[in-house]
Amino acid sequence: MEKPISKENQLDRNPKVFISYTQDNKEHIDKILEISNKLRSEGIDVVLDQYEQCPLQGWPMWMDQNIKDADFVLMVCTENYYKRIMDEEEEGKGLGLKWEGKLIYQHIYDSDSKSKKFIPLILKNEDTEFIPIPIKGSTRYIITDDEDYNKLYWFIRGI
């Protein structure tokens, strides 16, 4: 059994976070990068495709490895995200997230559906309806101000 980490050690530890999202538009992509950069500036080890130009192992294996290695996966829920992860998007569109969604579903399944690893992240209040079914019962973080961001940050830190 793992030894509990003290509050002091939790602040010294750099949890690894993978961000799963759709590239809906430039504003959305920039907001994801802003959140990622803020988490990184506060000691969270964030994995984001925007930091990677061309992974040697290819994108499918890169996704798989980073989801597996992450302490948490932030799932940025939008209508496009929902369609793709729930396999409701038209054929041939959004292949990267469709693949990522299958990997996420498998991890949830393998954990006997008991995992705090997959976190719904909402950037606009109206997007709460687009939380994928397997994580709908999880605590969601609606990041509309600093207070909401801080709740997510301290959850990731385990405090």
Image (cartoon, rainbow, N blue to C red):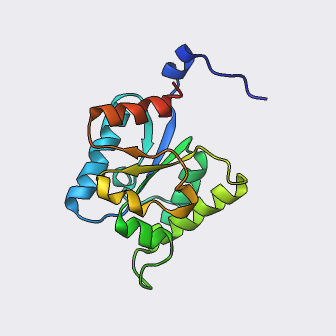
Residue 99, horizontal then vertical, whole percent? 52, 69
Q: Residue at x 56, y 40 (%)?
A: 71
Q: Is residue 91 above or below residue 102?
A: below
Image mark count:
0
- Residue 121 visible to the viewer: yes
Question: Where 119 sits versus 133, above or below?
Answer: above
Give the x, y percent position of residue 5: 63, 21
- Quadrant of residue 113 in the image? bottom right
Front residue of this view, candidates 139 and 32? 139
Q: Residue at x 52, y 56 (%)?
A: 136
Quick check: 25 above or below 149?
below
Residue located farthest toward the top when viewing the structure as drawn: 8
In the rendered image, the quadrant that contains the N terminus is top right
Apparent side of residue 149 relative to residue 85 in the rendered image (left or right): left
- Pick the residue in front: 102 or 52: 102
- Residue at the far bottom in the pictured view: 91
The answer to whether residue 154 is left or right of residue 123 is: right
Q: Is residue 58 visible?
A: no
For the point 57% across and 45% down, the residue is 117
Report the side of 14 relative to 142 (left or right): right
Name the residue nearer the viewer: 138 or 52: 138
Specify the quadrant of the image occupied by residue 25: bottom left
The percent position of residue 89, horizontal first and vertical second, equals 42, 79
Q: Residue furthest left?
A: 27
Please, which residue is most extreme toward the right here? 1
Q: Nearer the viewer, residue 23 or 148?
A: 148
